[in-house]
């Protein structure tokens, strides 16, 4: 059998502190903790509890990354929220409120340059607001009044809005250029409360409610048209989507009745069951932030139906292939 030195070209080091930048397969002995450790890559993605938001809420809008994210609006026990919270990877900080408190809204952009649109105030609205890092400004409205829609976009000048409820399921798709909304080609299946992810020119819409019930339908946007692709493994709505059109997640949601903790991973062609979230919940639509390498979901409702109220719980996703230090034991 080959020795570690023959495989790696060096002996196992004895160090007082763990290496700051180890490479895959590196092994060392930590003399401070008296532990044998090694550096590996995770085989599968997993969820871990992160720092909770300051305000419990569901049906909010989330944008940005896991080290620079933003959550806007939403509701708690039916009360509309106008709060905005920014996340720096460790803590949430309350910043400027949106002008119109609302739930079931959507958004696009970053933690310092975002746009939010539509929602319930409680009446359905087409109001649009822009964020410049410190305050929100009302700008031109959408063409279609609606709530529980999907929204994606990498910046506050390039967003896509689709689906929703207003009343009745919507199939309308609108494109935002930073100044105006333009109607483009509709979804094939009108629905609300879907999981969504992507950018203005390449997006996914998965699941949702298309009366008389939930659907598992997935549609792909190529910048011009929507095409039906492979379905989710289960029909559900109000789960969180995050990622890009070729690599995404659909986490949580409800199958009516009951909440689910399931997490499905999209590889651009098929959905595969992945590791579940730790807290089953719904009212997560549009609150997914980040990518399949590093993402998070925020808030939601842990109990199906009437109160108790919403939660402030945040869960962070670390995708497969992420670096991790492991401690070896003799058990």
Image (cartoon, grey):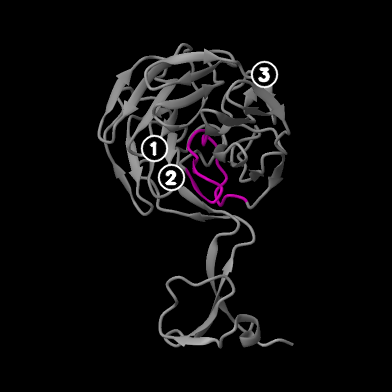
* The quadrant where residue 202 appears: top right
Q: Secondary structure at mark 1?
A: loop
Q: Secondary structure at mark 3?
A: loop
Residue 167 location (% of width, % of height): 54, 13
Identify the residue at horizontal 72%, vertical 33% (top origin): 231
Instruction: Tell me if mark 2 has few (under 14), some (14-19) or many (20+) residues whose alpha carbon lies within 10 angstroms of its own.
Output: many
Image quadrant where one finds the N terminus: bottom right
Residue 200's place in the image compared with 276, above or below, is: above
The answer to whether residue 294 is magenta is yes
Instruction: Tell me if mark 1 has few (under 14), some (14-19) or many (20+) residues whose alpha carbon lies within 10 angstroms of its own.
Output: many
Instruction: Tell me if mark 3 has few (under 14), some (14-19) or many (20+) residues whose alpha carbon lies within 10 angstroms of its own.
Output: some
Mark 3–mark 1 Cα distance, whole angstroms, equals 29 Å
Q: Main secondary structure of the magenta part?
A: loop
Q: In the rendered view, does 300 fall on the left or right side of 203?
A: left
Disc number placed over residue 65 in the picture, else none: 2
Image quadrant where one finds the C terminus: bottom right
Q: Is residue 77 visible?
A: no
| Residue at mark 3 | 188
Asked if labels 1 and 2 touch by Cβ distance under 8 angstroms, the answer is yes
| Residue at mark 1 | 110
Mark toward the start of the polypeptide (3 vs 1): 1
Residue 277 location (% of width, % of height): 57, 49
Residue interval drawn in magenta? 276-297
């Amino acid at each position: 059998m080959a020795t570690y030195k023959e495989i790696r070209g060096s002996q196992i080091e004895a160090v007082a502190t763990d290496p700051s930048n180890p490479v895959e397969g590196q092994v060392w002995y930590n003399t401070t903790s008296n532990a044998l450790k090694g550096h590996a890559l995770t085989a599968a993605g997993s969820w871990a509890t992160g720092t909770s938001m300051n305000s419990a809420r569901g049906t909010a809008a989330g944008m940005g990354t896991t080290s620079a994210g933003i959550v806007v609006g939403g509701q708690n026990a039916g009360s509309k929220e106008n709060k905005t919270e920014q996340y720096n990877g460790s803590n949430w900080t309350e910043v400027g409120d949106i002008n119109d408190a609302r739930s079931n809204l959507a958004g696009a952009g970053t933690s310092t340059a975002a746009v939010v649109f539509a929602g319930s105030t409680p009446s359905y609205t087409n109001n649009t607001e822009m964020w410049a890092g410190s305050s929100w400004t009302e700008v031109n409205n959408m063409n279609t009044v609606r709530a529980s829609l999907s929204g994606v976009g990498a910046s506050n000048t390039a967003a896509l809005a689709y689906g929703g409820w207003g009343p009745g399921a919507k199939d309308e798709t609108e494109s935002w250029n930073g100044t105006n909304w333009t109607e483009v080609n509709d979804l094939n299946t009108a629905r609300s409360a879907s999981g969504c992810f992507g950018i203005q020119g390449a997006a996914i819409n998965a699941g949702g409610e298309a009366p008389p019930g939930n659907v598992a339908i997935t549609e792909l946007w190529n910048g011009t048209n929507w095409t039906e692709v492979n379905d989710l493994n289960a029909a559900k709505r109000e789960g969180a989507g995050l990622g890009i059109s070729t690599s995404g997640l659909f986490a949580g949601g409800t199958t009516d009745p009951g909440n689910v903790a399931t997490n499905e991973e999209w590889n651009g062609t098929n959905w595969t069951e992945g590791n579940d979230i730790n807290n089953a919940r719904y009212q997560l639509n549009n609150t997914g932030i980040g990518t399949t390498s590093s993402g998070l979901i925020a808030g939601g409702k842990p109990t199906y139906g009437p109160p108790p109220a919403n939660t402030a719980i945040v869960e962070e996703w670390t995708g497969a292939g992420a670096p991790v230090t492991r401690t070896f034991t003799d058990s």
